[in-house]
Amino acid sequence: MNDFKVTIIDSLSFYERCLQEQVDENAFRYEIMQPLEEMWQYLNAPLTPKTPGGYDVVMASEMLGIWTPRKNTSLIESNVASLKKTEIFSECRQVLRKSAQYFSEIGYEIPVDEFIVNILLGDPENSVLMASEGYSGFGGIPGYILLIVVPNEFNRTRLKSALAHEFNHNVRFTYEPFNHGDISVEDYLVIEGLAEVFAEELYGIEQRGPWVQDYDDEELEYTIAVMKDGREARGFDQVSAYMYGDEVAREQGYQPVGLSRNAGYTIGYHLVKDYLKNTGKTIAEATLTPSETIVNESKIFD
């Protein structure tokens, strides 16, 4: 039985204060991000910049699409109450317990004593975030989960599913650590496919994220062929072009490879679905299976 502590950062109180008084970036840095300092260290983002105006957690947060006090509070004015109404703060622990149960059932003790969850308001001026229906997350470092949200009709019912997706990343990376600088397209397909199929298993296909697209047979076949040719490419800049598609690649300064939005997420989803169908494995078992095995037994590139 997996037993762990869940700590939820009280970001709501911080945002409510931002609407009532002048709050600077240092409050964001020390109240909202310091509990995640170890995570940021893994990502080489210091709590405070090493040089004035240099890279730090505030800048890193903005790059992820997180609203910070360096931007106008008018951007979050209506979103604070909307985020509270989703009830994700009160449901968060239940999501993680429910997710962990899948691994308890196959006898895997997750080697994490505490999960720190930070549910944050997104920046509605961030085009990449808004292109994914106003929400995204980060679960690349076991023990830490970020959920970034600009609340809207589409995502407000899908936040539990998004948390389950990020929890799956956390568990996966206790088995196969995430190597941001040397990850391959093939590895990333498996990582994202596992997480989205896991979330679907818990909360149903109707709660699936927008990153899985509905392709017709022709586009699916074409996209698989492009992925097959590029699946050995490594490094986050190259991988991103395959995962996010040409539109985001251009926005982020990466070389487009001829793919539509979120192509990698879509193919990863089908890859994992095919693996489960071909092997009869559960999604929890698949989460603890080498990427190479999943790809080979999915037969998606045969």
Image (cartoon, rainbow, N blue to C red):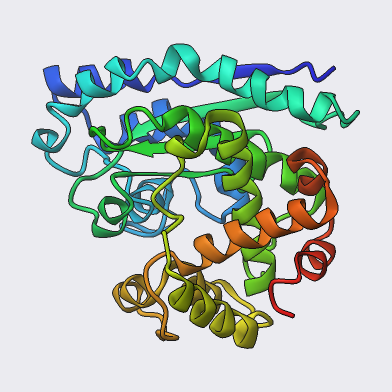
Check the image and name the residue furthest to the top. Answer: 90
Q: Quadrant of residue 37?
A: top right
Above or below for 20 versus 265: above
User: In the image, is 207 to the left or to the right of 82?
Assistant: right
The percent position of residue 264, horizontal first and vertical second, equals: 52, 67
Residue that appears at 87% across and 32% down: 108
Nearer the observer, 111 or 19: 111
Extreme residue in the right direction: 107
Residue that appears at 50% across and 78% down: 223
Query: In which quadrant of the rendered image does the C terminus lie?
Result: bottom right
Q: Is residue 158 left or right of residue 182?
A: left
Judging depth in this view, the residue of 54 and 31 nearest the camera is 31
Residue 93 appears in the rendering:
yes
> Is the residue 297 above or below the residue 199 in the image?
below
Relative to residue 143, is residue 288 depicted above or below?
below
Image-based side of 19 in relation to 108, left or right: left
Residue 3 is situated, as x and y percent measured from the top left of the image, at 78, 16
Query: Where residue 33 appears, x then y in whole percent?
Result: 45, 34
Q: In this orientation, does residue 182 appear?
A: no
Dividing the picture into quadrants, the one containing residue 149 is top left
Q: Residue at x 43, y 54 (%)?
A: 211
Q: Nearer the viewer, residue 14 or 140?
A: 140
Q: Position of residue 198 (x, y in %)?
A: 63, 40
